[in-house]
Image (cartoon, rainbow, N blue to C red):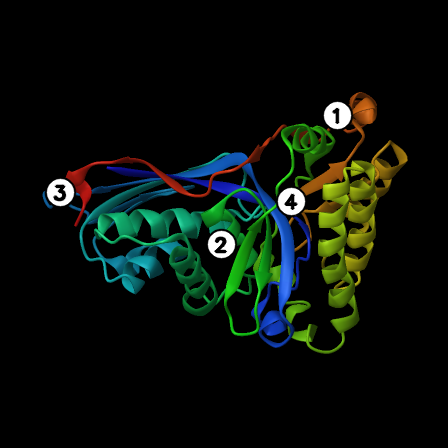
């Protein structure tokens, strides 16, 4: 058996500039962090004496003889992409719900790609792993997704990710002292709206317009990355919260699908009860709200949002990793 553990991510600034339709022409960058919430995937060889050749356990249980019978699209396509024909049993569990904006689909792809390369006996570096996952999601699955989530889940940590016009990328770790990082973490709240959506569905409403009609919005969103990094270094963290507010207002201008009256009501209530700023994590449309609330206001804020799920989290420094591997389960 092989078991992988892959973190979810929170993106603060720069989202939208990580789509190839933008950065291959203009470059892009994002400021993000991984958190201590994870996707776990286990994989083991399935002996030939079972009636089925593949067993996939996720929100449903699949026992099938042929790859093309697999309903889980990412599993099916990755088996074909990597030309794996061995019988396998794959289990998937996540700490947070799918389609909630924390990069769950990319974290799954990263964790699965990591496991399958171990299964095939291949050593793969972080950069190569991230690139393979980006290609797989965008070219093989044909999902309209950016390129930041895969990189964040592979590398882990609090980073500025820069996208180059030649398709390459770089990852710069944001070095903050422990006290400053702890204070920032203490002032952030993750609230689940209860509305699920796919990044693909929201992103397709504006991605094709990034080169023209939405260029002004993206350029403004990009400027928040450097400004956010400067604020973190100076240590006036409340300004970070205010910048989240500015960024959210700018991001809503990309598409009407990013927000709606219910989401606006949640956000306005948050601002009225002590939040200095916030944003929907991911492409928008639902999922998790991230709010910056000064710690002395948090108790009152949480009471006001009692009907929503408040997910406690900490920043994490590790990317995808293999927790366990048995030599018997290598190809």
Where residue 251 sits: x, y (%)? Answer: 76, 58
Q: CA distance from mark 1 to mark 2?
A: 33 Å
Q: CA distance from mark 3 to mark 1?
A: 49 Å
Q: Which residue is mark 3?
A: 47
Q: Earlier in the sequence, mark 4 or mark 1?
A: 4
Q: What element does badge 3 sit on?
A: loop
Q: CA distance from mark 3 to mark 2?
A: 32 Å
Where residue 118 sits: x, y (%)? Answer: 26, 48
Q: Earlier in the sequence, mark 3 or mark 1?
A: 3
* Quarter of the image where one finds residue 68: bottom left
For marks 2 and 4, give the one nearer the viewer.
Answer: 2
Q: Which residue is mark 2?
A: 150
Q: Which residue is mark 1?
A: 306
Q: Residue at x 43, y 65 (%)?
A: 135
Vertical order, 256 against 266 (above or below): below
Vertical order, 86 against 47 (above or below): below
Q: What element does badge 4 sit on?
A: loop
Q: CA distance from mark 3 to mark 4?
A: 39 Å
Q: Which residue is mark 4?
A: 287
Q: Residue at x 23, y 47 (%)?
A: 88
* Quarter of the image where one finds residue 16: bottom right
């Amino acid at each position: 058996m092989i078991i992988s553990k892959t973190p979810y991510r929170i993106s603060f600034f720069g989202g939208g500039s990580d789509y190839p339709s933008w950065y291959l022409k203009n470059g892009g960058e994002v400021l993000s962090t991984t958190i201590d919430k994870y996707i776990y995937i286990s994989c083991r060889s399935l002996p030939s004496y079972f009636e089925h050749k593949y067993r996939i356990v996720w929100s449903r249980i699949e026992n099938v003889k042929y790859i093309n019978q697999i309903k889980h699209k990412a599993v099916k396509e990755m088996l074909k992409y990597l030309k794996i024909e061995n019988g396998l049993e794959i289990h998937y569990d996540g700490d947070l719900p799918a389609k909630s904006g924390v990069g769950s689909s990319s974290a799954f792809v990263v964790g699965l790609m990591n496991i399958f390369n171990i299964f095939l006996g291949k050593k793969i570096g972080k950069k190569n792993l991230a690139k393979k996952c980006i290609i797989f999601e965008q070219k093989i699955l044909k999902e309209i997704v950016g390129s930041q989530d895969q990189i964040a889940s592979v590398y882990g940590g609090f980073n500025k990710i820069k996208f180059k016009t030649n398709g390459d990328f770089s990852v710069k770790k944001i070095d903050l002292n422990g006290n400053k990082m702890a204070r920032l973490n203490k002032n952030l709240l993750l609230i689940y709206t209860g509305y699920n959506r796919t990044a693909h569905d929201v992103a397709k409403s504006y991605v094709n317009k990034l080169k023209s009609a939405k260029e002004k919005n993206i350029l403004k969103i990009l400027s928040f990355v450097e400004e956010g990094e400067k604020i973190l270094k100076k240590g006036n963290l409340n300004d970070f919260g205010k910048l989240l507010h500015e960024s959210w207002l700018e991001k809503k201008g990309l598409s009407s699908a990013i927000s709606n009256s219910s989401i606006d009501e949640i956000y306005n209530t948050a601002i009225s009860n002590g939040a200095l700023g916030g944003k929907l994590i991911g492409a928008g449309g639902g999922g998790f709200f991230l709010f910056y609330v000064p710690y002395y206001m948090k108790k009152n804020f949480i009471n006001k949002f009692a009907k929503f799920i408040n997910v406690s989290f900490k920043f994490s420094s590790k990317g995808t990793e293999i927790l366990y591997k048995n030599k018997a389960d290598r190809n």
